[in-house]
Image (cartoon, grey):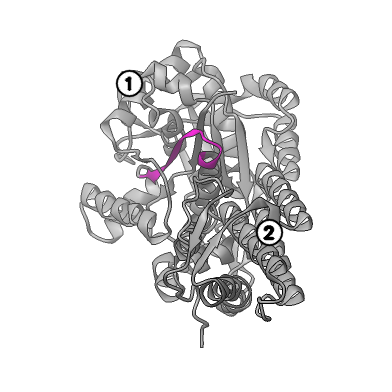
Amino acid sequence: MSNKFYITTTLAYINGDPHIGFALELIQADVIARHQKLLGKEVVFNTGTDEHGVKVYRAALEEKKDIRVYVDEYAAKFDALKKALDISWTNFIRTTDPHHIAACQEFWKRCSANGDIYKKDYKIKYCVGCELEKTDSELNDEGRCPIHPNLRIETREEENYFFRWSKYQKPLLELYENNPDFIMPNFRFNEIKNFVKSGLEDFSVSRLKEKMPWGVPVPGDEAHVMFVWFDALINYISTLGWPEDEARFKDFWPGMQIAGKDNLRQQSAMWQAMLMSAGLPNSKQILIHGFITADGQKISKSLGNVIDPFEVTKKYGIDPVRYYLLREIPSDEDGDFSAEKLEARYNGDLANNLGNLVSRVAKLIETKLEGKLDFEGKFLDDEVRQKVSEAGENCEKAINEFKLHEALAKIWELFAYANVYIDENKPWADVGGHPEHFLKTMTSLVYLIINATKMLWPFLPETAEKIFKTYDYNPRANLEGYKFIISKIEPLFPRLR
């Protein structure tokens, strides 16, 4: 098994400020990346900004800014999410990077050499919000895109280059058949299978430069720039140094991709066909998440109802926001953002359940054992050992199945069990007459907390590190014989008023 692991989000489209929906995608990918690090793998975690296309071009015009000034300004805002959300990405790619542009042109040449790019005149109905052509069956009763109902469908008629997507119907279906876990969740996998089975139409991969000048130049034809979807998807491999750094590319590709459900077609069918055309391996796995809604309405930059992740984390803290998004919103389904629910989760799960447990046990060590506990396995409760083992297996299984909300729930079941355990065993009672019972209780509680915190680290890294610091524990150390020293107890999560 390879010790290399690669995961990438989609790239943020910079026609507006960062919003909580993209924050969710980053945090989900971050959990998986950190989990793989715990398994000892070398991880490449990619994200970045998608900076070409008509929406970006128009946004710059509306703000009366030079296009380069505009994209630099907005790319910096998305780059700032790393600190704001405590994300561990290793690569931040911009589609205006010179290397990415060169990679796109090489990719184009390979597809063209394979006979998969040709030029024709065409007329289409086009959603600027999706940056995709739409058939009548994909529009609502008002003739608008259901994803961007506030935007007027445009009719376009011009000469473009096209990609022979129709050629790849059978190869795509074979890819899906041979890789039963290629797309998670399974109901999204069924969606794309049915879509491809219904037949594929070749799609446009260029725009006339005189109408839309902001894009990657088409090799050998200065009159055209690449269609934004063709250009942007190539970031998944250009970020690995393709095509120049063949060794690094082969080390990490194919990788795992995470994307929203409105990207299903592009990530799992268009991109996969493009890879086949260029003679490159297909992605390893694609994880599809849902939308975040607010008051039942999808959060979207084009709808103008975004929730600012910087403001939310400033108000509640990074880990409370990470916890809410990961626990309250199912990884593969839509979920609703609510300040009231976030505060309830904060007070109930974080302040009362976790924070109170960590403080209570630390205080007992401080007051009853002069702040020191030497961990000895002979004092460990067998039932506690079993509970930790089961929770670890269940958590691992849930992460592998892209059910991060269920993985967190399993960890919290362990914290809840620890709270019950401490109440039932009453270690605050006089230790003098029952020293072995006291040491067994305290050893078992510390074992519960430390192991549950190790499981928690990919989800809430800042909180996990605070817990380890409270107990003066090195997470890389063996528990047996470890000397825990309590020197300072600070509340993890002060209750919200």
Tell which of 440 and 231 is nearer to you: 440
Left or right side of 275 for 96: left
**Nearest to viewer (mark 1 / mark 2):** 1
Residue holding disc 2: 141
Point out residue 324 in the picture as x, y percentages from the top left corner. 58, 66
- Tell me, for residue 418, which label it has, or none: none
464 versus 252 height, above or below:
below
Q: Residue lying at the far front in this picture: please name it.
A: 433
Crowding at dot 2, Cα within 10 Å, few <14 / some 14-19 / many 20+, comes out as few
Residue occupying the point 66% across, 77% down: 432
Q: Is residue 125 visible?
A: no
Q: Is residue 282 visible?
A: yes
Is the N terminus in the top left, top right, bottom left or bottom right quadrant?
top right
Segment colored magenta: 37-50
Tell which of 80 and 121 is nearer to you: 80
Point out residue 306 in the picture as x, y percentages from the top left corner. 47, 67
Q: Quadrant of residue 330?
A: bottom right
Marks 1 and 2, how far apart in space? 41 Å
Residue 49 counted in the magenta span: yes
- Counting residues from the start of the chain, the first of labels 1 and 2 encountered is 2
Q: Secondary structure at mark 2?
A: loop
- Tell me, for residue 219, which label it has, or none: 1
Q: Secondary structure at mark 1?
A: loop
Residue 162 counted in the magenta span: no
Crowding at dot 1, Cα within 10 Å, few <14 / some 14-19 / many 20+, comes out as some
Residue occupying the point 69% across, 63% down: 440
Residue occupying the point 42% across, 48% down: 88
Tell which of 180 and 130 is nearer to you: 180
Point out residue 155 in the picture as x, y percentages from the top left corner. 50, 46
